[in-house]
Each structure stands twice: as C-alpha cells, then as structure tokens.
C-alpha cells in the first residue's frame, strides 16, 4: 500500500514537471511556488514571451524557481515578476542556461541598491509592444535595458 501511494504521488509530481516547458504551466508553477527547486529554466521560445509578460508585474515572493545554470548559489526568495523577466531575457538572448549567474537585475550606477520590479517591468513591456513582430534573431540584438543603468 505504501508503494502504491508513492507511485501515484511521484506520477502526479512528474506530470507537473513535464508541463513546465509550456509557458502557461510554467507561470502557474511559479505563481503557486511549485516550480521544482534548483531546476533550470524551461525550454521556452519567443512565442511564449507575451504569455510570460502578463505576470511580469507580479510581486509575490517565491522560493521555488529556476536557478541560473551558471550558478551554484542559492539566492533566496525572489519576486515572481523578476523570475519571469529573467526567463524572458534568457529567451531573448537565446541562452537556455540563463543570462547571468544571478536571477535579478542590478543598477550599474549603484550596485548595492536593490532594483525594484516596477522599475524594469515597463522597459520589458514597452520593448515587447514595439518589437514583438521581429524575429528571434532580431530580438537578440535589441535589449529592453538599452539606455538604462540596469543589467542582469
């Protein structure tokens, strides 16, 4: 009986993880704080950016989110919206392992200052509204952060 319970539980968990490459399912896993901890960014594409950006302003704090493949550090709780923007940036730059070794934006003029989500969401939504009809290759060369002091 114990084995049957474990199998059903593992199967249900596996279904949630399998769906993470779908943008809506990925957003759902993030917003419910059920993304597999320490997993990498899912395989999403340019076509998924619009779905992702709908949650870019989400200030909910989560502990379960994809970590940068280049990092061994745990960065603690993060805002859903910042993880969404990190994912969008990874898609834009075509870097499935992540765009930097940390899942948040820094201000190059004041590196110790914590950049607020509201400061960068508008940059990304404006960028998408203006460039969503461009190819993935073109988007790679058009940064939403261009002209700002922010970087990943």
Image (cartoon, rainbow, N blue to C red):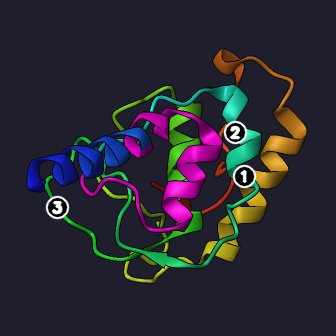
Determine whether, in the image, residue 68 is placed left or right of residue 44.
left
**Residue denoted by label 2:** 49
**Residue denoted by label 3:** 73
**Residue in view at x 50 percent, y 56 percent:** 29
Q: Is residue 43 above or below residue 15?
A: above
Inter-mark Cα distance, 1 to 3: 26 Å
Q: Quadrant of the C terminus?
A: bottom left
Pick whichever of labels 1 and 3 is earlier in the sequence. Answer: 1
Nearer-the-camera pick, 76 or 23: 23
Would you call the spot at circle 2 few (<14 residues within 10 Å), some (14-19), or many (20 or more)?
many
**Residue in view at x 65 percent, y 45 percent:** 24
> Magenta segment: does it hold 23?
yes
Pick whichever of labels 3 and 2 is earlier in the sequence. Answer: 2
Inter-mark Cα distance, 3 to 2: 26 Å
Q: Main secondary structure of the magenta part?
A: helix
**Residue in view at x 46 percent, y 81 percent:** 114
State yes or no: discs 2 and 1 in contact (Cβ < 8 Å). yes
Residues drawn in magenta: 16-38
Determine whether, in the image, residue 137 is placed left or right of residue 99.
right
Inter-mark Cα distance, 2 to 1: 6 Å
What is the x, y in percent for residue 77?
36, 77
């Amino acid at each position: 009986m114990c084995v049957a319970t474990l199998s059903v539980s593992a199967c249900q968990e596996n279904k949630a993880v399998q769906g993470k490459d779908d943008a809506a399912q990925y957003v759902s896993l993030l917003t419910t704080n059920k993304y597999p901890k320490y997993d990498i960014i899912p395989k999403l594409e340019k076509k998924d950016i619009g779905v992702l950006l709908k949650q870019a302003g989400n200030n909910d704090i989560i502990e379960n989110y994809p970590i940068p493949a280049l990092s061994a550090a745990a960065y603690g709780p993060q805002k859903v919206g910042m993880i969404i923007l990190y994912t969008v940036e990874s898609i834009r730059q075509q870097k499935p392992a992540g765009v930097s070794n940390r899942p948040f934006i820094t201000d190059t003029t004041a590196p110790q200052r914590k950049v607020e989500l509201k400061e960068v969401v508008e940059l990304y939504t404006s960028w998408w509204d203006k460039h969503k009809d461009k190819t993935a290759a073109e988007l790679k060369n058009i940064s939403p952060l261009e002209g700002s002091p922010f970087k990943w």
